[in-house]
Amino acid sequence: MSIHLDAALDAAGRGWPAFPLAAGSKLPAIPSAHPSGDSRRGKCRGDCGRDGHGLYDASTDPKRLAAWWERWPRANVGLRTGVAFDVLDVDVKQADGIATLVALLDAHGCLPPGGSVATPSGGLHFYFAATGEGNKAGFAPGLDWRGAGGYVVAPPSAIEGNPYEWGHPPDIELPGPPPWLLALLRPTMAPSAARAAIVGRSASSYGRRALEAEVGRLAMAREGARNAQLNASAFALGQLVVAGSLDAREVVEALATVAERIGLAPGEIEKSLASGLQAGMAQPRRLPA
């Protein structure tokens, strides 16, 4: 029996659904059940009865796991999040998540003891009891949340020969996230209150209404269109900044706050805000009399 199958079976024994990833990769090993052109591609969650649905294949059935790893003995181990556990993913590739985490721990105290993993890139995974939250990329600089609809790569998987390793093996019962971490994941202000809180007093009446409208558009943007909407909102408000109807700092703070809450990564936010504002400020909007 391979060490990867051992790990998958151990996870299954904890009630953690596992599935095979391609050897040396983060991508599923099982080819898609719905090739390009199939109307069910990207929509089916395994109700067709076949394997080939990524994280939705994940199982705790030892026989099913054994059959998969018999076919792909070197397959990495994927664990579906949001079912029995969630993961705080501390990333160091897009932003310095470790610096963010250290600052949060200085302010709030230690994380409760539970499972932790060192990743090949130098990042960290912290395992917590499932919260019911979905994935939240970049909810703080360098910090991602893997919950419902997500998965993580588990030890002893490796990427380019560099392994995932348990720093602290998981206990039988995982702890819940501390209250301060949940608060970051679950903003308490309703959208209308959030809009009111981030609209500055120095804006004109017309500017305030425009800022509220763009914040609302960004908050409601569908997945896949959020970065484009951030850029468009920054452009529209940049036209009012140069016209003297809004303060640039207030625009940046307002849009960045909402962008973080809807899951855009810090790098995306900074780039889209800068390009949108610069373009908008080059084309001032004529204000109504």
Image (cartoon, rainbow, N blue to C red):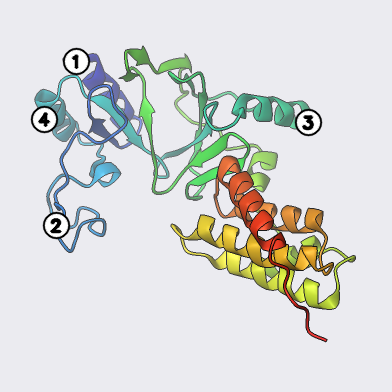
For marks 1 and 4 on the same chain, the one whose residue lies earlier in the sequence: 1
For marks 3 and 2 on the same chain, the one whose residue lies earlier in the sequence: 2
List x then y, in percent, for residue 61: 20, 36
Residue nearest the observer in this picture, 168 or 265: 265
For marks 4 and 2 on the same chain, the one whose residue lies earlier in the sequence: 2
Q: Residue at x 52, y 40 (%)?
A: 145
Q: Amino acid at mark 4?
A: Ala
Q: Amino acid at mark 1?
A: Ser
Check whether the beta carbons of the residues at disc 4 and disc 2 lie within 8 A of each other: no
Q: Amino acid at mark 3?
A: Ala
Q: SS at mark 3?
A: helix
Residue nearest the observer in this picture, 43 or 281: 281
**Which image quarter is the N terminus in?**
top left
For marks 3 and 1 on the same chain, the one whose residue lies earlier in the sequence: 1
For marks 1 and 2 on the same chain, the one whose residue lies earlier in the sequence: 1
Q: Which mark is residue 48?
A: 2
Q: Residue at x 64, y 62 (%)?
A: 235
* 108 relative to 169 in the view: left or right: right
